[in-house]
């Protein structure tokens, strides 16, 4: 039995390039609309930024200095001298740069540097790359531990590699809550009650090495709490303090108090079992109960943040903030949707006026739409959609049609598709033009990604993804489609 090769539209659809587009569109629609994880009450899995979903942003300024000194000085000796003089942590960044983790007046700093044998210095507000990344990680941990969705933390770094600001964007969080979460320094301390209202220091947050998620009491009751582990040094310090001040003999009279920047956030006595265990050996795993009910659950979540995040290495101050209401965010979503549909309609009209052939216009629009769907499917997993990202989507829509027009004009000659060999030659030439354009655009967008400016970074990521999807996936498929259409 002789099998017949597929012909017509069936042959076009079965081409591996077209089939790849169909499969990716199907998977992308599933990624966008099929529920997975916790997506709240939204209809899609797309992640929207605060300007489309409502929320707040806060920009924090590092209270620190990066000092540049001349050649010839002993950078370690200068760091020790300045650190002692100002009672501050000073970190040598390289043989010419110091990071002072404290805001210091420049004239006093020059005097201290001169006393250390440095003739001239140059000062800039900010911190080095390592400290900036540490602050970024702590803030991300702090906010994510609260369960806040769609959080972006980015450091704003200048050409010298010095970060002066860190920006935090939180979708769905009001400004007051955002300032409480982000603006808090996070200097965590545990103290034990001694006599009367007096307390004695036990350990700081750097002794906390791991924190569990808030859970209900493992003993079976409905009480909420947080389990956490402390280091060997912290466990020995806790044992010594509890023995010295009588907490293991009379726990109810010697509560353990937890403080954040001097404000008490938790207080409770040792359990009888814990008191017996500490009397015998240092205890490394602890559990802080907060009670039952929704309020206790919220307290447990906040306590987990303070335990887990620890202290920022440098002080920060709020340098700017802003917010978008949820109602305004919904309005922006509608405007963006209308803008996208309007752009698609305008593109379709212009293409029709150029070719006057529906059989060409419809595949062009379908190819362009498929490209946007695939791009949104990828964005579900890697990128929030804010107004800048939507602008990039519309730009991809326009540049995509431009490239499809290049292919159509290149391969079609006098209304007919040439011979297969000549067609492939012209299609290859058209794709080469598109690839060169794509590479140029990627190089142009790449610095925006490296600069870590959140809004521009989102624009650049969406633009680059759209370029790659178009050049590698949808353009070759369209080349096959247009050949089959014109052959008829």
Image: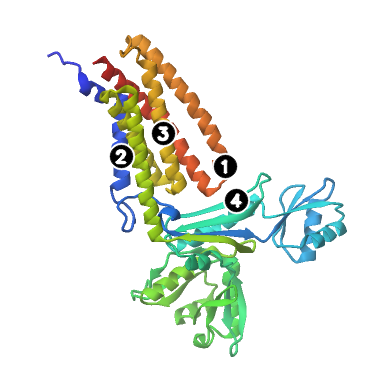
Q: Earlier in the sequence, mark 3 or mark 2?
A: 2
The residue carrying mark 1 is: 450
Q: Residue furthest left?
A: 1
Tag in front: 3 or 1:
3
| Viewer-nearest residue: 94 or 256 | 94
| Viewer-nearest residue: 192 or 431 | 431
Q: Position of residue 116 (x, y in %)?
A: 85, 57
The residue carrying mark 3 is: 398
Tag in front: 1 or 2:
1
Q: Secondary structure at mark 3?
A: helix
Q: Is residue 364 above or below residue 58?
A: above
Q: Earlier in the sequence, mark 4 or mark 2?
A: 2
Q: Earlier in the sequence, mark 3 or mark 4?
A: 4
Tag in front: 3 or 2:
3
The residue carrying mark 2 is: 27
Q: Earlier in the sequence, mark 1 or mark 2?
A: 2
The residue carrying mark 4 is: 156
């Amino acid at each position: 039995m002789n099998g017949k090769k597929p012909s017509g539209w069936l042959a076009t659809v079965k081409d591996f390039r077209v089939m790849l587009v169909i499969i990716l569109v199907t998977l992308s629609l599933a990624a966008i609309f099929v529920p997975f994880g916790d997506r709240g009450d939204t209809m899609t899995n797309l992640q929207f930024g605060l300007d489309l979903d409502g929320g707040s942003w806060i920009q924090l300024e590092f209270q620190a200095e990066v000092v540049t000194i001349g050649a010839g000085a002993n950078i370690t000796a200068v760091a020790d001298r300045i650190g002692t003089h100002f009672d501050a942590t000073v970190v040598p960044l390289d043989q010419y740069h110091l990071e002072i983790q404290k805001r210091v007046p420049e004239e006093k700093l020059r005097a201290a540097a001169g006393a250390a044998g440095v003739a001239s210095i140059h000062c800039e507000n900010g911190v080095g790359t390592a400290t900036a990344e540490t602050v970024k990680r702590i803030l991300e941990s702090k906010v994510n531990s609260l369960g806040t969705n769609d959080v972006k933390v980015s450091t704003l770094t200048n050409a010298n590699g010095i970060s002066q600001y860190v920006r935090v964007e939180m979708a769905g969080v009001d400004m007051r809550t955002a300032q409480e979460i982000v603006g808090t320094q996070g200097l965590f301390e545990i103290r034990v009650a001694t006599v009367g209202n007096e307390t004695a220091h036990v350990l700081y947050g750097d002794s906390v090495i791991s924190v569990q998620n808030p859970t209900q009491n493992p003993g079976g009751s409905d009480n909420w709490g947080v389990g956490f582990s402390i280091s060997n040094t912290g466990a020995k310090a806790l044992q010594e303090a509890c023995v010295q001040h009588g907490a293991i003999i009379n726990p109810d009279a010697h509560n353990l108090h937890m403080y954040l920047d001097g404000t008490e956030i938790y207080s409770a006595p040792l359990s009888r079992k814990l008191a017996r265990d500490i009397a015998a050996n240092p205890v490394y795993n602890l559990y802080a109960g907060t009670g039952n009910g929704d309020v206790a659950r919220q307290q447990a979540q906040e306590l987990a943040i303070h335990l887990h995040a620890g202290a920022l290495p440098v002080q920060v101050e709020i340098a700017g903030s802003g917010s978008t209401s949820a109602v305004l965010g919904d309005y922006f979503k509608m405007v963006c949707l209308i803008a996208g549909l309007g752009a698609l309609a305008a593109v379709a009209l212009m293409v029709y006026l150029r070719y006057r052939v529906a059989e060409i216009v419809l595949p062009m629009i379908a190819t362009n739409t498929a490209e946007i769907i695939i791009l949104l499917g990828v964005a579900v997993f890697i990128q929030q959609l804010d107004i800048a990202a939507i602008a990039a989507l519309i730009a991809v829509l326009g540049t995509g049609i431009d490239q499809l027009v290049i292919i159509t004009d290149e391969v079609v000659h006098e209304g007919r598709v040439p011979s297969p060999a000549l067609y492939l030659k012209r299609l290859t030439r058209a794709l080469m033009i598109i690839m060169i354009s794509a590479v140029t655009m990627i190089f142009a967008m790449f610095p925006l990604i490296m600069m870590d400016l959140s809004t521009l970074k989102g624009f650049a990521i969406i633009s680059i993804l759209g370029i790659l999807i178009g050049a590698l996936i949808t353009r070759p498929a369209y080349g096959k489609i247009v050949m089959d259409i014109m052959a008829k």
